[in-house]
Image (spheres, grey):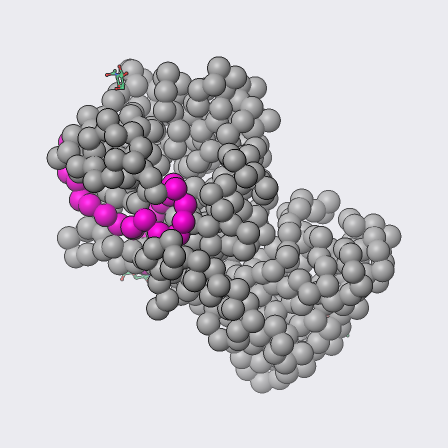
Amino acid sequence: MPRFSSLRDFSLLCLGLALLHTRSFVMAVNPIIQTRFTADPAPMVWNDTVYIFCDHDQPGAATGFNMIDWRLYSTTDMVNYVDLGSPLALTAFSWASYNAWAPQTIERNGKFYMYVAAGQSNGNMAVGVAVSDTIEGPYTDPIGKPLVATSTGNIDPTVFIDDDGQAYLYTGNPVLYYVKLNEDMISYSGVVQNVSLTTQGFGARPNFLYNAEKPTTFEEGPWFYKRNGLYYLMYAADCCPEDIRYSTSNGPTGPWQYQGLIMGEQGGCLGNHAGVIDYKNKSYFFYHNQGNSGGGQYDRSVCVEQFEYLSNGLFPTIEMTYTGAPQIGTLNPYQRVEAETMADSFGVQTQPCSLGTQNIDALEDGYWLMVQGVNFGRGSGARNWTASVASNTNGGTIELRIGSLTGTLIGSLTVPSTGGWQNWQTLSTSVSGATGVQNLYLVFRGEPGFLFNVDWWSFSK
Ligand SMILES: *[C@@H]1O[C@H](CO)[C@@H](O)[C@H](O)[C@H]1NC(C)=O
Ligand SMILES: *[C@@H]1O[C@H](CO)[C@@H](O)[C@H](O)[C@H]1NC(C)=O
Ligand SMILES: *[C@@H]1O[C@H](CO)[C@@H](O)[C@H](O)[C@H]1NC(C)=O
Ligand SMILES: *[C@@H]1O[C@H](CO)[C@@H](O)[C@H](O)[C@H]1NC(C)=O
């Protein structure tokens, strides 16, 4: 399995990713999102689906973060991700105007609570909370002020509800704080507590490049949860570049026992931020790096690896890869598939669709997307492809290919002008030769400039 263990290897990885885009066999799952730069992933399992809340690097920020909203994606197979748009933006908070940083969302009594870090006008970061009746949002600020705002370091909130119903929120860089949230999830009891950052609890710091006064490895990005009776606190450590380390405890507020490294300094980012879930009896570790084309310090991208806990519940070390997690099952093409569903893509962007959900847009000649593990079934397979399309120019053609960008052409749809970028028409074309489980490529063709938008597609037999 290809791995990278240093910054130099990472540039080889980037080359590898470029090559993969012209190769027909190995699938590059990482980074999992190509349509935007995303970071600080907070995975959440809900309704048998994995949702990934993350923040969002606006491109072209050469010298600092330019982050104004949060993004949401979902998957049921760990390979094909659906863009669910932006559930929350800084504009939802009257008290915040910059640095839309790391989120995490949790459900309680049928409502969804999204905790984020955001910048206040006094120059300090604070933890805010936003609430929604649906996981997709939109989320709104129920309290009109920050939830946790000590003088410094209120970033990277992580939240967990224990078996006895007590919810905990940890946050911090480089101090580590926690509060006990009330049952309403939008207030807390008592004072903001400091976690004592002992070397017993958090390990002796080997890297003194930044914050040399700090004796332990903890830096930021806490991720708090419980599994099989053991409490875990995972965090970005050894700033900088950061690695991911963790500590465990028999109680929700410590004392913590340092357990060491999970993921080394890889992938080229000064920072990292991990999130962990169990899904369909497998364990997954989300993080970010600079792995997308055009990636950089302020243009990060979310990745995932599958892993297995050791028999005593501890972590193995996990390496960044571009093969990512194996696919669970296959994708059914005989139902409505949102066009913003993809395992890999080139050039494709997404935007809110006037009919609801998102659509893919700004498609130009040579852009493409790939949906992995599409199950056309046995026998003669698919006979017909239907898509909802819109174009304000002369349109173009969607080529349907299997196996690779230059693989067998199973059909093509001519998209005419529809008189507007949100004037949707449902069009069909016949297809042949699509049987079995295939990687499906949608390749967009036409004259220079923007061609058309696509909202959804579906095959029929
Ligand atoms: C749960 O998932 C199913 C299948 O995707 C979907 O039909 C249903 O609407 C979802 N329920 C909620 C509450 O989101
Ligand atoms: C928490 O730690 C910070 C930084 O060391 C310190 O300024 C603050 O007084 C501490 N707060 C409490 C309640 O101990
Ligand atoms: C997970 O494991 C349990 C117990 O072994 C099993 O009953 C269940 O079917 C498994 N679920 C999936 C999705 O594989
Ligand atoms: C393709 O399927 C769609 C939706 O079922 C149907 O409306 C259309 O007539 C079919 N087209 C062809 C060429 O069979």
Q: Quadrant of ligand 3?
A: bottom left
Please state the horizontal and vertical placement of residue 399, each as a whole percent of the image.
Answer: 70, 71
Task: Give the residue drawn at x 23%, y 48%.
Answer: 261
The boundaries of the magenta stretch are 255-282
Q: In the displayed structure, would residue 401 be above or below residue 85?
A: below
Q: Quadrant of the C terminus?
A: bottom right
**Dividing the picture into quarters, in which one does residue 239 lie?**
top left
Q: Along the horizontal axis of the image, is 104 left or right of 257?
A: right
**In-front residue for pair 438/100:** 100
Q: Residue at x 50, y 30 (%)?
A: 99
- Give how far across and how far down residue 313 sits, in percent: 19, 51
The residue sitting at 29% across, 50% down in the picture is 264
Whole-percent x and y of residue 284? 35, 54
Can residue 328 be seen in this snapshot? Answer: no
- Quarter occupied by the N terminus: bottom left
In the displayed image of the protein, which residue is found farthest to the bottom?
Answer: 379
